[in-house]
Amino acid sequence: FTVAASQSYESIRKRGVVLSMDIVKGLHNDFLSMYLIWLTRVFFTYGHVILQKLYFREKLPYSVHLLLFCVLQVILFAYPLYFCADMMKMVKFTLSIEQLAVMLKLYSYFSVNNRLHATYLQERQAKNYDEEYKLVLKSNPHRVLYGRNLSFRDMTYLIFTPTLLYELNEPRHKKVRWTRVFQGFLGLYVTFFSLVFYFMQICYPALKNHALNSYDCYIQILVPGFICWFLIFLVFFVFKLPIMGELTRHKNKRFFGDWWNARDFAQFWRKWNLPVHEWCIRHVYQEIIATFTISKKSAKLLVFVVSAIFHEVMAMYISNTWIPYEFFAMFSQAPLVLFLRYLQLSAKFSNLFVWILPVLGPAFGFVVYLRD
């Protein structure tokens, strides 16, 4: 932060404040448009509730249910691409994260309810099923059972909760702790506007300077890119997700681990983003092993592939085109994990090697996807 402050001071002294009111107004209008798109998408997700209700009442066969689910997911993926084409890339980045999160939540909703439906069909064949159902409700009236969870209220809670996994009965706090919400919003706005100001003041002039070649531009924004990456981490994982957790009274507030102590890239990605890691474990790793006769090592490799696809989808939203740099940069870390484990380096040297990723990676992404 000392480096960021000194760089900002020197930049202001040399070229003045780059963040003009036109850019601020453009960001404001784009973010308003983004949240209007997002709110529209929230209502569109209610179509998944209707699908699940029809499937629960056995008015839809599974094949039709699966087909309609895929159609809805494709529409949810393509819908924002059309409307955000002319938005600022910073807004597109935020939209891509929100969009991907909603799609992962909806898949979890689909998968968990289908598994519950299979269990429900088996239990319903028992003679005393209706009596047991009533006894369970009588003993715990607040418990949500399959069938009663297929509501718009349940879907709304899933969309706004900070987790990506759908659960039938999630533990919640009794009330919203408004002091923490206020502290979170304060930290969120300060960090976000610091990120915008620093990016526009330091990175933006270099990215728009066509006198610099790509290599010189990369070297110039190497340290600023890392600082922006860290500020993005603070915005989403330290402030935004805990705020959503408090407002939804969600008890699980652990969104990242000690990724700074990771000894290889696999450990880094497991600890960097716990919600996505937990989603990949349940809906990629466990489902692949349960469905196909595949080894655990191959399943772990497929998790890496899926994670690489997620990153490429986000990059595609930003650039409005398909440039598979992000995919290959992510997927290439799989052999590096094996290489590091083969070397059996000490904890300090392994951790030093892992830190190459957050230090060198963000500037490369900025040059590839943000430089015209």
Image (cartoon, rainbow, N blue to C red):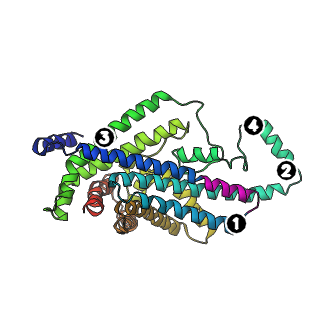
Residue extending furthest bottom? 293
Tag 3 residue: 193
Q: Are marks 3 and 1 in contact (CB under 8 Å)?
A: no
- Please give the label number shown on residue 98: none
The correct choice, above or below, for 109 with respect to 241 in the image is: below
Viewer can see residue 290: no
Decide if residue 27 is on the left or right side of residue 156: left
Dot 1 or dot 2: first in sequence order is 1
- Label 4 vs label 3: CA separation? 46 Å
Where is residue 105 drawn, in percent x and y?
55, 53
Secondary element under disc 3, as helix, strand or loop, is: helix
Dot 4 or dot 3: first in sequence order is 4
Quarter of the figure with the N terminus:
top left
Dot 2 or dot 4: first in sequence order is 2
* Residue 56 colored in magenta in the image: yes
Dot 2 or dot 3: first in sequence order is 2
- Please give the label number shown on residue 129: 2
Decide if residue 111 is on the left or right side of residue 213: right
- Please give the label number shown on residue 62: 1
Secondary element under disc 1, as helix, strand or loop, is: helix
- Label 2 vs label 3: CA separation? 57 Å
Mark 3 residue type: Phe
Mark 1 residue type: Tyr
Where is residue 44 drawn, in percent x and y?
56, 54
- Label 1 vs label 4: CA separation? 31 Å
Mark 2 residue type: Tyr
Q: Main secondary structure of the magenta part?
A: helix
Could you say which is closer to the camera, residue 122 or residue 88? 88
Q: Nearer the viewer, mark 4 or mark 3?
A: 3
Q: Nearer the viewer, mark 1 or mark 4?
A: 1
